[in-house]
Amino acid sequence: MENRARVELQPLSPFAPGPSEGWRVCQVQVDASDPVEGYPNLLGSELPRRLEALIPAEVVDQLDPGQPWTVEASLVAPGRLRVERIAT
């Protein structure tokens, strides 16, 4: 199911290589979740919530691993979200 939310994430681990070229993973805590218009928000329940984040390398370069992140993300599997982009 296509879904998306604007979420506040707290990084909990360093970035590690992802499942394929151009991707990184890390453990995050979802502290807040707001809907994105036109999409269901599957990340808004049971907060705070710990998940694995799958992040494109070009987005990783924009994230400070010591600070919370505000991004748009999708729940793509049980226990895993995919960061789509930095939220504006």
Image (spheres, rainbow, N blue to C red):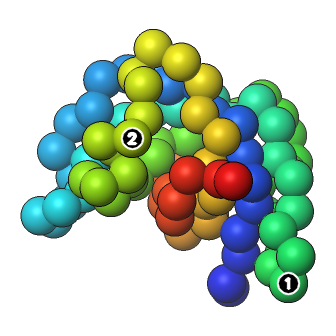
Vertical relation: 24 (above or below) 11: below
Disc 2: CA contacts within 10 A as few (<14), some (14-19) or many (>=20):
few
* Three-letter residue code for mark 1: Gly
* Residue drawn 65% across the image and 53% down it: 87
Q: Which mark is residue 38?
A: 1
Q: Mark 2 belongs to which amino acid?
A: Gln
Of 75 and 35, nearer the camera is: 35
Residue at the front extreme, as displayed = 88
Q: Determine whether, in the image, residue 25 is placed left or right of residue 50.
A: left
Up-down relation of residue 36 to residue 60 (above or below): below
Query: Does residue 78 appear in the picture of this structure?
Result: no
**Residue under pointer 2:** 62
> Along the horizontal axis of the image, is 2 left or right of 16?
right
Residue 16, horizontal then vertical, whole percent:
21, 36
Q: Residue at x 40, y 22 (%)?
A: 65
* Residue 45: percent from left, percent from top: 87, 48
In the structure shown, which secondary structural element does the residue marked by tag 2 occupy? loop
**Residue 81 in the image: x percent, y percent?**
54, 56
In the displayed image of the protein, which residue is found farthest to the left?
Answer: 21
| Residue at 55% in and 41% down | 51
